[in-house]
Image (tube, grey):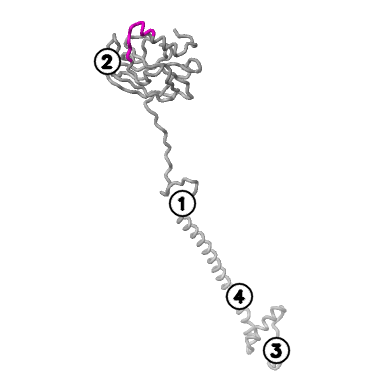
């Protein structure tokens, strides 16, 4: 039977102590974590936290021999509702520990102010069974009760948490990776690239100038050759005259588009 929610953890603890005193049974809890020297509900955990559970080898009461092996359970404090086996086949005469990532569903955590009182129980091992009677058993050893709070996400039973590591990409050229957002190209390589670009530009300009000079020389030679070819008939026609007179007549012919001009006689020029 579930007690009313207005009953505080202190009242439940006092009732438990009174019941043990009336029955005349002294139970020595094997659990050392949660601590036995603290008041009920002094320790609290949230779903997703790692709860380090520990126990020693003192599994005994005044009336019951300790079991050879036991199973570790977590249950609601009032022996009802949620229960889950955390670890099985635990030697009854040895100390041990277990890191439990609290994974009680949020909807199972009840009580005032979204709190719920839970307890660890060491029960005699039953092969192939994942349930046990909710009635108190002489071989059932309980821990000090603790409080659970809902978490943002559900966790799973685990002994540890492995952090996620993101590998850093390795630079393709073997240079160290940049840490401040600047280029990872070494300074001497940047200078070398700049010199190559500048040399290419200068080389292009010089090459263009040489090509232009060659074109001008060829055109000049072609023009001179054409002039010589065109003046050859005049030199033949005005044989006996000087070459200057022949060229002079040729130029006059080009200007007048008429027949070749008569050359002045030697006496007229005199």
Q: Which mark is residue 185?
A: 1
Q: Which residues are magenta?
A: 18-28
Q: In 3D space, how far apart are the residues under numbered discs 1 and 4 (Cα atoms)?
A: 56 Å
Q: In 3D space, how far apart are the residues under numbered discs 2 and 1 (Cα atoms)?
A: 69 Å
What is the x, y in percent for residue 119?
A: 40, 16
Cβ–Cβ under 8 Å for marks 3 and 2? no
Q: Upstream in the sequence, badge 3 or badge 1?
A: 1
* Residue at (62, 86) in percent of width and height: 243
Q: In the rendered view, would you say 177 is above or below 209?
A: above
What is the x, y in percent for residue 102?
A: 42, 22
Cβ–Cβ under 8 Å for marks 1 and 4? no
The residue carrying mark 3 is 264
* Residue at (53, 66) in percent of width and height: 206
Q: Upstream in the sequence, badge 3 or badge 2?
A: 2
Mark 4 against mark 3, which lies toward the viewer?
Answer: 4
Q: In the rendered view, would you say 256 is above or below 89?
A: below
What is the x, y in percent for residue 219?
A: 59, 72
27 drawn magenta? yes
Crowdedness near tag 3: few (<14), some (14–19) or many (≥20) residues, C-alpha within 10 Å: few
């Amino acid at each position: 039977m579930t007690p009313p929610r207005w009953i505080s953890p202190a009242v439940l603890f006092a009732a438990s102590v009174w019941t043990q005193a009336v029955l005349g049974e002294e139970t020595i809890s094997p659990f050392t974590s949660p601590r036995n020297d603290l008041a009920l509900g002094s320790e609290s955990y949230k779903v997703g936290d790692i709860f380090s559970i520990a126990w020693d080898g003192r599994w005994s009461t005044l009336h019951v021999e300790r079991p050879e092996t036991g199973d570790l359970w977590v249950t609601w404090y009032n022996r009802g509702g949620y229960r889950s086996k955390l670890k099985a086949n635990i030697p009854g005469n040895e100390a041990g520990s277990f890191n439990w990532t609290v994974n009680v569903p949020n909807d199972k955590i009840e009580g005032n102010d979204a709190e719920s009182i839970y307890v660890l129980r060491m029960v005699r091992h039953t092969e192939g069974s994942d349930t046990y009677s909710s009635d108190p058993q002489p071989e059932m050893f309980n821990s000090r009760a603790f409080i659970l709070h809902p978490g943002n996400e559900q966790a799973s039973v685990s002994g540890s948490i492995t952090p996620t590591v993101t590998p850093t990409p390795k630079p393709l050229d073997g240079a160290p990776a940049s840490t401040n957002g600047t280029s990872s190209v070494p300074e001497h390589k940047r200078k070398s690239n700049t010199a190559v670009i500048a040399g290419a530009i200068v080389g292009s300009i010089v090459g263009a100038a040489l090509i232009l000079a060659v074109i001008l020389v060829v055109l000049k030679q072609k023009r001179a050759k054409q002039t010589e070819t065109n003046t050859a008939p005049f030199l033949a026609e005005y044989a006996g005259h000087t070459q200057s007179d022949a060229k002079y007549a040729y130029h006059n012919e080009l200007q007048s588009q008429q027949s070749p001009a008569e050359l002045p006689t030697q006496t007229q020029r005199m």
